[in-house]
Amino acid sequence: MLHTSFNGYGRKPTLFVGALLFTIGAALQAGATTMLMLIIPRLISGFGIGMLSMCSPIYIAELAPARLPPQYSACHGRMGMENFVSLLYFLLLLLECLEMKRRNECTKTKQKR
């Protein structure tokens, strides 16, 4: 989907949509009162950051002078690794939340007995 979006609509509109998604997600996270209200906007922000991190190095490489693009677009692979680490962190956080919920339910059933 992203490949089609920034090839079909252009780099600037894709960067704008990515920034908009990130901003909306950040605003919703700021007003979160429950864990679910924190996780869903985090996913929205993640899609925005994903769009920005995949599109911006290409946009920078296209705008850079002819002698510089390899230096500017080389950070693209590093950003992919950072996104992978962020995904792993999110999955670990999700597993921790599920484990906490399970433990809490276990203690509630023990207290009722």
Image: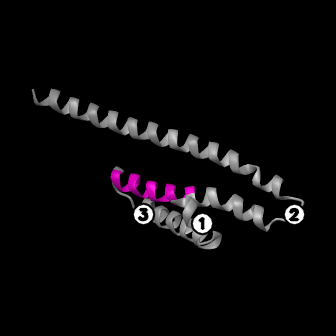
Q: Classify mark 2: helix, strand or loop.
A: loop
Judging by the rendered image, the residue that carries numbered circle 3 is 28
C-alpha separation, residue under disc 1 versus residue under disc 2? 22 Å
Q: Could you tell me residue 12's position as x and y percent? A: 64, 72
At 28% from the left edge and 31% from the top edge, which residue is drawn? 103
- Outermost left residue: 113
Disc 1 or 3, which lies upstream in sequence? Answer: 1
Q: Classify mark 1: helix, strand or loop.
A: helix
Q: Residue 112 carries which label?
A: none
C-alpha separation, residue under disc 2 versus residue under disc 3? 41 Å
Judging by the rendered image, the residue that carries numbered circle 2 is 66
Q: In this view, does 34 lie to the left or right of 86?
A: left
Q: What residue type is labelled 1?
A: Phe
Q: Which amino acid does label 2 sit on?
A: Ala
Numbered-mark total: 3
Q: What residue type is labelled 3?
A: Leu
The relative height of residue 66 versus residue 40 in the rendered view (above or below) is below
Judging by the rendered image, the residue that carries numbered circle 1 is 6
Q: Could you tell me residue 52's position as x and y percent? A: 61, 60
Disc 2 or 3, which lies upstream in sequence? Answer: 3
Q: Residues within 10 Å of mark 1 (few under 14, many from 20)?
A: some
Residue 39 part of the magenta-drawn span: yes
